Amino acid sequence: MALPDYLQDTAKDFAKQLTATTAVPIDTTKFTGRQFVGTEDPLQTQAIGIAQQGVGSYSPFLTAAQAAGTQGEATLGTAATTLGGAQQFLTGAQGLAPTTGAAAQTLTQDFMSPYQQQVIDTTLTEFDRNRAIQEQSIRDQQAQIGVLGAGRAGVQLAEYGSGADRERALLQAGLLQQGFGQAQQSAQQALANQLGLAGAQQQFSGAQQGLAGQQFGQAGFQTGLSNFEAASRAADIQALGGLGSLRQGISQAQLSADQQAAQSEAFEAQQRLQQYGAGLGQLAGFGAVAPQLPTGAETSALDKALGTALGVGGLYAKIFAKPQIVVR
């Protein structure tokens, strides 16, 4: 279909402008390239640095917890050994606590001094010597007054002998009673000593068990510190990463808007020619509509960038969060 005569000049003008416009290459570097990609935000850099520093940071706490647990186990074993040692003293104390009078007497005899009889014999020998001296003194007195051998003199010696016998028997009984009492005290003291040693062993075992409990508690405390350190670090990383991603998304939205503006500016002349040609075609009765040249992303750059930022921020929580160690 031929153009009407009144459009011939207009069509020639359009052809000249189209030739001139399309003859000039479009500088795509003005709206493409890495300059339109948002860089890493400083908060993201800080989050990554903290994450790198935190790799294995919980190891010293776990090592300390393991050491404390090992010490607690060893101390607990020592406490069991100490407690077992108390049994020998309890057994010994049981043997020193007779349940019958005969057994008590036998036990008391075991604690009597081996020199008891020697002391008694020596004491009685000395008593007998003094008695003989006293009897001789009485005879000498009787001889001086001339009544030696008389009836009254014999009665005097007999009475002195009877009294001396009683005193000798009392002396011997006192010595025996004293030795028996000392033996009883020694037996009771031995029983108390055995019970005291058993009690001391049990108390020492209890102290060791308490120390073991404290060491196990220290192990749990160290593990808790490890969990807290990991959780706190993960929270810091997540917060910094999320904020950094948000700021990176905003920066990316701005760069994307600049990219769209530069792209629109680069194709602006061609777009005007498109509209010019479309109008010319309609006037000529062609009814054609020229295709649109690219003008940039149709989706809002800000919405797209923010969506990406939120997604990246969520990744920080998944990547840097550490598993929790629970002590039961």
Image (tube, rainbow, N blue to C red):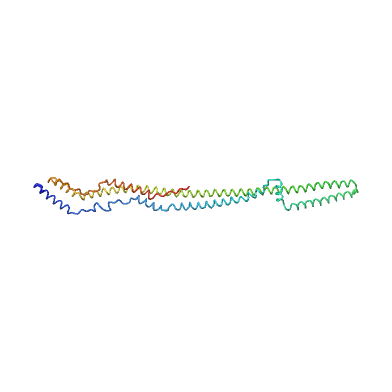
Q: Residue 105 or 55: which is nearer the viewer?
A: 105
Q: Is residue 233 left or right of residue 178?
A: left
Q: Is residue 72 left or right of residue 153?
A: left
Q: Position of residue 31 (x, y in %)?
A: 24, 51
Residue sitting farthest toward the left:
5
Q: Position of residue 167 (x, y in %)?
A: 80, 47
Q: Residue 252 or 97: which is nearer the viewer?
A: 97
Q: Residue 99 or 120: which is nearer the viewer?
A: 99
Q: Is residue 16 left or right of residue 166?
A: left
Q: How many marks?
A: 0
Q: Position of residue 222 (x, y in %)?
A: 47, 50
Q: Position of residue 232 (x, y in %)?
A: 41, 48
